Image (spheres, grey):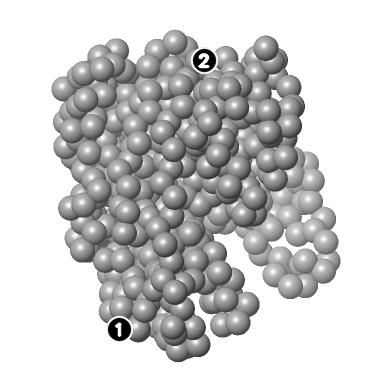
Amino acid sequence: MDQNQTPLFDSIMKFNERRPAYFRIPGHRFERGINQRWRDVVGDAIFQFDLTETPYTDDLHNAQGAIAQAQELAAEVFGADATYFLVNGTTCGNQAMVMTAAFEGETVAIPRNAHKSALMGLIMSGAKPVYLMPQLHEEWGLHGGISPQDVERLFQEHPDCRGLMVVSPTYYGVCSDIRAIAQVCHSHGAILMVDEAHGAHCYFSEKLPAGGLTQGADMVAQSIHKVTGSLTQSSMLHTRWERIDRGRLEGNLHLVQSTSPNYLLLTSLDMARHDLAVRGGELIANAVELAKYARQKINDIPNIRCAGREIVGTAGISDLDETRLVISAAQLGMEGFRLEDILFEEYGCDVELSDYNNVLAIVTFANVKEDVDRLIAALADISRRFAGGTPLSKGKPLPAQPQALMTPRRAYFSANEEIPWEQACGRISAEMIAPYPPGIPLIYPGERMTDQVWEFLDEYRRRGGHLQGPADPQLNTCRVIRE
């Protein structure tokens, strides 16, 4: 195919050239109905791309024209049998993958570090989860990879498991051995799904880990917006058909995607694919080199460290996306949370996230050397200012996984009640509770609250840590299954 084509962009341009009298949704009628203050700042042209299913622009839920062509071009670039554009983010891609892997009552394996969208997929499908805990890299306080040996043990214990989801690369750039895991899954008649939200760029540089599709994954969901140039909330789902029921997957995508897809998001996917196809190698190579420069300079700063390839081969880590800068000032006695605040408030450097040990800075092809130099200079000054601090002690290890007494779906639809947090021990949780970061749920809906989990969460909440999942973010109360 001719990757210089941009079929969706071209179809919208063709439509706008006609400037028809417009009686469709959306109601703003190009730029005319947009707030004038907004127009004064951003101009008018962008609003002409906020269309719907016109005679030229195709229908995402029955793609036969421009969207179908754009998806075919993307499939060729990523090496998929088929690609689907997603306007509800990788969240809906993960939901669709889980729902395609297993029906209600069937077993599917989910890593404990899976994004909460995997839980949503379990609730929608009614599948019974078995969980895999990624290994822990204690020195950095990072969760590592899923090992093929652990996957093999899982299938020995659960021979009826229909599929496995793996997060690779993780938020921190940590990769599992997808090729070996795919072989294990396929030998047991199961499919492999990869949450590759953070890995779309890996298909365009030999200096990065190989993409999941190239290593044998059956379905891969990618957040194109995270690192490769589309607009926020736009993603892609790629598949190989050998083990996937096409009708079932497409039906699930209809279920989880908006019936009013945003054409700005769809067009941004078409244009991001064009950039990647035409000059992706050059763009991603620039990001890799810039991150390499940053890592070297950061590691030259006293008492500041940036993780690199030395962690590969440990804690189930098969490879590392080196455009992710995992930076620690623990030797200065500084938690990652504090380092993030100082970098932003005092130096104007905005990093992606922080945890107890680290901050994470993401380098993309759109960064420039001045960005990186500003971060390096800030870290060097922090090193000088806070020299002599007492190094941090290691973070508290996560508690053991609690017992599951019902599926997430059954728990979600069961009667529940709000109780004081102090009364939660021994009760079956009706909600997910995950300290964030790292975002590993300590308890899922349907699991019984153990003393160990309660004590860990109680200490975390009293320190003011950020929690995802509970209805009460301060965890003064929690929701449990009504007895």
Find residue 80 and report its horizontal and vertical position in percent: 29, 39
Front one among 199 and 404: 404
Q: Is 47 placed left or right of 13 in the picture?
A: right
Q: Is 41 placed left or right of 298 in the picture?
A: right
Front one among 73 and 85: 85
User: What's under tag 1, amino acid-wise?
Assistant: Asp
Task: Determine which of the numbered discs, if any, sits on residue 406 in the image.
Answer: 2
Work out which quarter of the rendered image holds the C terminus and state it.
Answer: top right
> Do labels 2 and 1 touch, CB within 8 Å?
no
Instruction: Identify the residue at horizontal 18%, vertical 39% (top origin).
Output: 179
All told, the count of numbered labels is 2
User: What's under tag 2, amino acid-wise?
Assistant: Met
Instruction: Identify the residue at horizontal 41%, vertical 46% (top origin).
Output: 397
Q: Quadrant of residue 130?
A: top left
- Classify mark 2: helix, strand or loop: loop
Task: State whether residue 24 is above or below residue 377.
Answer: above
Find residue 123 and report its horizontal and vertical position in percent: 54, 22
- Classify mark 1: helix, strand or loop: loop
Q: Distance between the Cα atoms at labels 2 and 1?
A: 51 Å
Task: State whether residue 418 is above or below residue 127.
Answer: below
Task: State whether residue 188 is above or below residue 90.
Answer: above
Residue count near mark 2 (Cα–Cα under 10 Å), binned few <14, some 14–19, many ≥20: some
Instruction: Identify the residue at horizontal 72%, vertical 35% (top origin).
Output: 477
Residue count near mark 1 (Cα–Cα under 10 Å), binned few <14, some 14–19, many ≥20: some
Q: Earlier in the sequence, mark 2 or mark 1?
A: 1
Task: State whether residue 414 is above or below residue 369.
Answer: above
Instruction: Identify the residue at horizontal 55%, vertical 39% (top origin).
Output: 455
**Residue marked by disc 1:** 300
